[in-house]
Amino acid sequence: MKVILREDIDGLGKSGELVTVKDGFGRNFLLPRKKAVLANEQNIRQLEHEKGVISARNAKLKGAAEELAKKIGSVKVTIKRKVGEQDKLFGSVTALDIAEALAAQGQQVDRRGIHLPEPIKTVGNHEVELRLHREVVAKIKVEVVPE
């Protein structure tokens, strides 16, 4: 099945691309969630028209992400957690906890853009990546302190 992507999808393609997917993936996931449209003649003509609009929108989103990266780059997040022996946390600090701490400081960030290879389980300073755009990555400092 050939579809035209309406938004970026990891491992598949970028917004505005014509891609071939398996019938079930297109019919059950992409089309109902409006992440893609069928690649018929009318939609292909419309795609050609919208390519300029899409590139302008991507440039605007990238500019906004770069602005946000400059603001967030200087932010330091402090999270208090209960600790046990050897400064190990009861539980862990996840991307959701970091997103809530940033929101408390007035910085709205999507938690899915916070990249943690694994949850933070120790007290101390940690550096965390924020993927604000596919080409813009910001790093913030997260300090986990005992409660």
Image: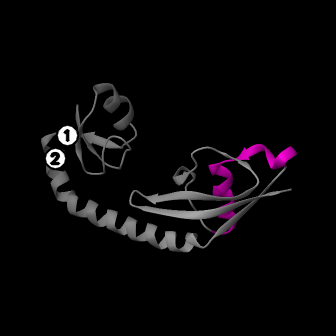
Q: Residue at x 33, y 62 (%)?
A: 58
Residue type, label 1: Ala
Q: Residue at x 84, y 49 (%)?
A: 82
Label 1, label 2: how many angstroms apart (C-alpha)? 6 Å
| Nearest to the observer: residue 31 or residue 57 | 57
Task: Give the colour scheme shown.
Answer: one colour
Q: Are marks 1 and 2 in contact (CB under 8 Å)?
A: yes
Query: Residue 79's image quarter?
Result: bottom right
Specify whether residue 99 is in view.
yes
| Nearest to the observer: residue 36 or residue 114 | 114
Mark with earlier residue (1, 2): 1
Q: Residue at x 60, y 73 (%)?
A: 74
Instruction: Tell me where the magenta segment starts and ends, as one range.
Output: 83-106
| Residue 99 point in image, percent of width and height | 63, 56
Q: Is residue 80 left or right of residue 107?
A: right
Disc number at residue 88? Answer: none
| Residue 81 point in image, percent of width and height | 81, 52
The residue lying furthest to the top in this view is 24
Disc number at residue 44? Answer: 2
Residue type, label 2: Ile
| Residue 48 point in image, percent of width and height | 16, 55
Query: Residue 52's image quarter?
Result: bottom left
Q: Is residue 14 left or right of residue 76?
A: left
Whether 11 is drawn above or below 145: the answer is: above
Quarter placement of the C terminus: bottom right
Disc number at residue 39? Answer: 1
Q: Is residue 129 left or right of residue 124?
A: left
Q: Dot 1: what SS?
A: loop
Quarter placement of the N terminus: top left
Q: Residue at x 32, y 41 (%)?
A: 12
